Amino acid sequence: MVEDRIQDVKVENRRSKITQTIESLVNSREQMLVSFALLAGMPASETDSDPVAPQPKMLQSFLQQLVDYLALGHFEIYQRIKEGNERRGKILEAATKYFPTLLETTDFLIEFNDKYDAFEVDHTDKEELDMLRKDLRQVGQALSKRADVEDLFLESLG
């Protein structure tokens, strides 16, 4: 009886920890997405359809939030499964289904981070700004795809 209660407490603690981790991941993602939205598409004014050129501080802030978000998911959730420490069939099945997309988007987003980590926005270089805007559109697509798949995966953890 005491051993059963101890096991129940351990299971309850693991569930509580995973719930907190999921909440942290979702909050991190939301903050990063707000930063991305500000970076990627702010029009200069309500009547101007051209976006404002991204500011270097905004780009660096977004990149930091992006890396923090990716690391949180990787080290707090996905790594456990990758290392074979998860035994629940439902979660393993979901991992098999969703991990390829999560890994694909992670790789793409890390490449974007590496490309722009030391990047200084030159507001006079139209070609450079066009390249950044094109890359930001692709990042937006990757983030949208990732969020959809990640939400499905996180549902399986509950």
Image: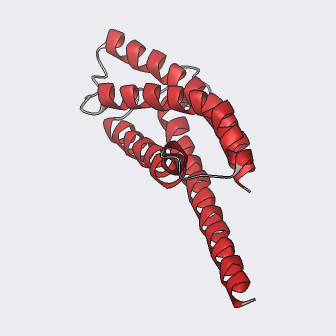
Q: How is the image coloured?
A: secondary structure
Q: Residue furthest bottom?
A: 2
Which quarter of the picture shows residue 142? top right
Front in this rendered view, residue 51 or 57: 57
Q: Quadrant of residue 58?
A: top left
The foreground one among 32 and 91 is 91
Residue 144 appears in the figure:
no
Q: Residue at x 58, y 27 (%)?
A: 100
Classify residue 59 by image quadrant. Answer: top left
> Is 25 on the left-hand or right-hand side of 83?
right
Residue 113: % across, % down: 36, 32
Q: Is residue 52 above or below residue 17?
A: above
Please report the residue visible at 43 percent of the width from the left and 47 percent of the height from the top: 71
The image quadrant where one finds the N terminus is: bottom right
Residue at 71 percent across and 39 percent down: it is 93
Residue closer to the observer: 133 or 47:
133
Q: Is 37 rendered above or below residue 68?
A: above
Judge from the rendering whether residue 19 lies leftward or rightward of residue 114; answer left or right.
right
Q: Position of residue 73 (x, y in %)?
A: 52, 48
Question: Quadrant location of the C terminus?
Answer: bottom right
* Residue at the outermost top position: 127
Badge count: 0
- Left or right, 106 with reference to 147: left
The x, y position of residue 88, in whole percent, is 69, 52
Can residue 156 be seen by looking at this rendering? yes
Foreground residue among 96 and 111 = 96
